[in-house]
Structure formats: C-alpha cells, structure tokens
Image (cartoon, rainbow, N blue to C red):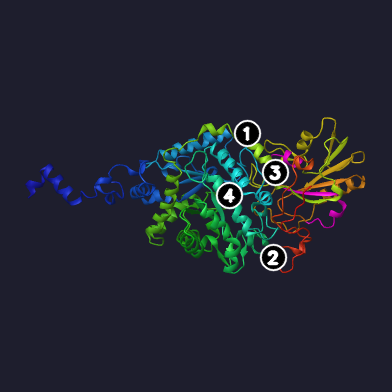
Amino acid sequence: MFQIIRNKTVLWSIFLLMFGSHYGKEPGDDKVSPAAKVTVYKDPTKSVTDRVEDLLSRMTLEEKIGQMTQVDRQFLERDSDIATRYLGSLLSGGGSTPDENRPQSWADMYDRYQKIALSSRLGIPILYGIDAVHGHNNVVGATIFPHNIGLGCADDPDLVEEVSRITALEVAGTGIDWTFAPCIAVPRDERWGRTYEGYGESPDIVARLGKAAVRGFQSGKLGSPGNILACAKHFIGDGGTKWGTGRNGKADRGDTQISEEELRAIHLPGYLSAIEAGVGSIMASYNQWNGTYCHASKYLLTDLLKEELGFEGFVVSDWEGIDQIPGDYKADIITAINAGIDMVMVPGAVPFGGESYTRFIELLKEAVEEGSIPRSRIDDAVRRILKIKFRMGLFENPFTDRSLTEKIGSKEHRAVARQAVRQSLVLLKNNNGLLPLSKNMERILVSGKNADDLGNQCGGWTISWQGESGSVTEGTTILEGIREVVSPATEVLFSRDGFGAKDADVAIVVVGETPYAEWEGDKADLTLDNEDRETLRRVKSAGIPLVVIIVSGRPLIIESEIDDWDALIAAWLPGTEGQGVADVLFGDYNPTGRLSMSWPRSMSQIPINVGDEKYDPLFEYGFGLSY
C-alpha cells in the first residue's frame, strides 16, 4: 500500500476520486449541469431567467452582498472598492458631482467607475442612481422642468411622459442609468417640505401621472436606447405624516397615523399604476405607519408589495433609511433585509453620522453566516437586482452613449420644458380682464425677489440637495422671458424691492419662496415673508395695475393680501424656462392649469384636502381661470 501511494499518478487518481467533485471549481459550479458549462450569463441570446440563475450560481456570498450595497461616490474610501467589494450600485446624492459639473465630466466619471466594476471576477456592471426629479437637475446645463406640483396642475399624462422621456435621454447622456423618480407621494399637508415633489393631493392624479412618468423614463421597455430605470418612491404613506411626529417635531420622516383602509385608498393607487407600467425599482419610505418604520415592515414590503401586488423588481432603501430602525446597526440590517429591502443605500456617509459601507458589508455577512438572515432571502434580493441589470442591457452596453451627451440642454428639450411651464401655471385671479397684457405697453415694472433669480424659480433639488438662490445653472429667468416677448419699443424696468413703480403702466411682482428640499423645507408658517410684503406695499402705493406671480413649492397664505392684487398666477417652481411664464402673461398661451391642491385661507385650515367634511378653501381643488 505504501509503495502504491508513492506513485504520484496513483495518488492523484485517489485524490480526484475522493475530492474531484469540488476541486478547482467556482462556488456554485456543482449546481451547473455539464450542458451549461458555457458562460450562460454572458450570452445575450439566452433568456434573462437563465442568465440570472447562471450568474447567481457562480457568486460567492461576498459578491452577493456587494450587489446589495449602494454607495455615494463621494464616500468611496478608494475607487478600487467598486471591484474588490463587488459593489452593485453607486449614486450621486444632491451635490455629489464630479469636480467639473458638466455633462462630459459626468460621462467620463461614470465610464471610469464602470470599467472598475467590470474588472471584478465576474464582471458585473454597476447601476448608477441619481435624483433626476425634474430633469437631470444635478447637472449644470441640463434642462430643468417644473417640479411635480406644477405638472400636476397641468394634468397632462402625455406631457409628463414626454418630460420623463427627455429627462431619461439627458440622464443617459451622462452614462447614469437610474433615477430615483417619480415621487408618487400624495401630499396631504402643505407644511411638509416635500409637497412640491407630489403631483397633487388626490390619489387619482398621482396614479395617472406617476404611470406616465414611468413610461417616459423606461420608454415602455427597459433596454431601449436612451431609457433609464425608474424608481417609484416612497413606499408608502410619506405624504400623509402627521405634523409634529417627524424630525424636530415637524412632518418629514414622521408617522402616518391612518387606518389600513385609508392607506390603501389614498397612498397605494400610485404604486398600483407604476407597477402596471413596469416600474423596475421602488424605494422604501422614511416614515412610519402607525409606529412601525416602513423600512422594517415585512407586511408592507413583502406581503403587500411583492406578494399581493406582484412587484417583480427590487426594493431599495432611502439614504441611511435603515439606520433609524430601533436597535443597533446590525439589528437594523437584519430587520430591514428580512422585511424585504433588496438593496441598501448605505451610502457610506460616516462624516454625517452614518455607518460606512465596509461596516455594512461585514455585518450583513456576519448576519447571514450566523443564520439571522436566510441565504434564500439574499438570493432573492440579488436575483431581483440582476434581473433588472440584464433587462436593461447593461452587460452588453455598460458605457455612456456619447451621442446623447451633446443633446443635454438642447433647444428641442428646452422647448418642451417651456411648454410644460405654460401648462402648469394656474390663473387664480384676473379682475377686469387685466390679463393677458399687451406686448406694446410703453413701460412695465417687474419687481420681487423671484423675478430675476434662476435658482429661486427652480427650487430645491437643483444642482445641490437643498438648491440655492442665484445663477445656479443655465436658463431664462421670468424677467428675461418678459423682455424676450414684449415689443422692442416697450421699456421693461426691474426693481427688486418695488421702488420706481409710479410711472409704469403695469407692475408684475414675482414673490414666494426660496429653495428648500426635504427636512429643511418643513415650515409651520406659510405666509409671505417681510420682503415680499414690503415690495407689494410699495408697488400698490403707486396706484397702478398689479399682477402678482407666486413662485413656490406649495400654496401660501395670502388671504389678507389678495384683495390688493388685480391678477394672480401660481407659477409653482417652473424650472429653467422662464419664457413659459411670459407666454401666459402676454397671451401667447391661454392658461389651462387647474389646482391639484386645495389653496387654504389660513394656517388654521391646514391640513385641508378635497373631500374634507369642513371644506372652505380660498381656492378649491381643480380651480383655475382662463382668458
């Protein structure tokens, strides 16, 4: 016997006989039949199901966990982690931009990250996500459309689909393939700082326009040229939080204290229509529902969304969304993944108090190995993510289509944005038919802090997270739009503070809000600020006709001032194409917008929604005048 095993050939034969079924194979190869030894997942002629199962069978636990991890590119400890940590997704949060914020730089950045991802053992491409919520709004020079509240007042599904289609083209032109939109919240309290992200207070209009947005982003079928992955958000009830239950005693990330019947009647229809339109991803919501965080609710994320509604895409968490679940971070991970979260937006924001993605990966692996999270749950999550990647064609076309880059911010795209502005405006008052104004007036005074400020008319989620005043990107202010459409002989004077109105034929005063986004936008007092009131007082004292335009992300309290105004237009947050406002002012477009939100008389009426038992708003839901 000893003589026999000294013979290396015989020894090798015995070794292979004992261990050969596993020796030298990739993890999971024992599950692949001999007929499937070709790399099925790399073969575009194979079905998506076959490609997913083949790739999943080859993956280690570490590679699967990597696919479930999404990191903001600004918090990457090193770029090589994309490959060595097998990251499945990157994102750019608000303001997370390349050093030069231009389309070409975004495309170069995306392609560089994608090349690193493809260098990993299995070469799985990344998904790159961004909040392109009213155009490709993080990119300087992109077309910025009206925020959703304005599109809700237009209530035109074809327009919303076209706006989303153009947004998809501009996003794809920077390489990015996933937008965290549409927001299909149903805002029920105007004090909430995300009110403008919703189409309106009615579930019907949200369902109708949300479906159109998904069709526009995904072009009806994932994988078509120039389309991107849509993400319906935030599941579920984010627009119904009770004031005082959120951060700092306000509304954002608060508790939606309603019955299941009301949750389904008001906040679910938008998701039904988005799923019907084929939405590929859904984002979980920060809010609680009767004390339980949505990120921790297996009933909402698995029983309702995935099983009852039949959602086949993947569920992504919101920014550090799992961190707020009661318990330590490992417990948060276990609860969220078992509840049905498939991809976690970590995002690695240690400077902001969050956990690092490396810590997340370590704890998730530990939880799986100890049995706290079933491996079947991991496989389900990764299967859902890979299915979308294959459907999108990322394995065949992982890099930027540079033919789309040059179209970002094009005249054709801006023309659609201008039309969206026209349709979104709501004429609320027009005494004695003052509007439309003549283009041949001798002298027009334009005043107000929002008349010549591109940042203010774009609002939050523009170039940076909260947005900011000033010339933040390329576009046309309302003042510039007015100067473009009037006759060459008309003198257009500008006085921000309202001085110099005496000799004008008419005054156009543009007031309202300055930029804000989630959390910081929660506001207990929606009356006009002192600057606006003083400007209006000065202009009114001149005794000339007064047209007021309100630029805001929600209805404001104006009952004590409106009697002094001859005409009033709600312009919402129109974006970069201020000519659309001028088109309505001077009669090139007869206003068609109708309120998608009730306009309250006073703060004491808020929250106010159509259908309330006591319903006496300043302007009703659906109100709007035409010429």
Dot 4 and dot 2 residues touching (CB under 8 Å): no
Amino acid type indicated by mark 3: Val
Give the quarter of the image for residue 604.
bottom right
Q: Badge 3: how crowded within 10 Å, few (<14), some, or many (20+)? A: many
Whether residue 330 is visible here, answered yes or no, is no
Compared to 166, does 533 lie above or below?
below
Pick whichever of labels 4 and 3 is earlier in the sequence.
Answer: 4
Dot 4 and dot 3 residues touching (CB under 8 Å): no
Give how far across and how far down residue 176 sits, in percent: 52, 40
Dot 3 and dot 1 residues touching (CB under 8 Å): no
Q: Is residue 427 left or right of residue 196?
A: right
Residue at x-position 88% and y-position 35%: 442
Whether residue 582 is visible here, answered yes or no, is yes
Give how far across and how far down residue 302 sits, in percent: 47, 61
Amino acid type indicated by mark 2: Gly
Depth check: 290 or 15 in front? 290
- The secondary structure type at the circle numbered 2 is loop
Say which residue label 4 marks.
212
Say which residue label 1 marks.
410
- The secondary structure type at the circle numbered 3 is helix
Dot 3 and dot 2 residues touching (CB under 8 Å): no
Q: Is residue 587 left or right of residue 328?
A: right
Say which residue label 2 marks.
611
Q: Is residue 490 left or right of residue 475?
A: right
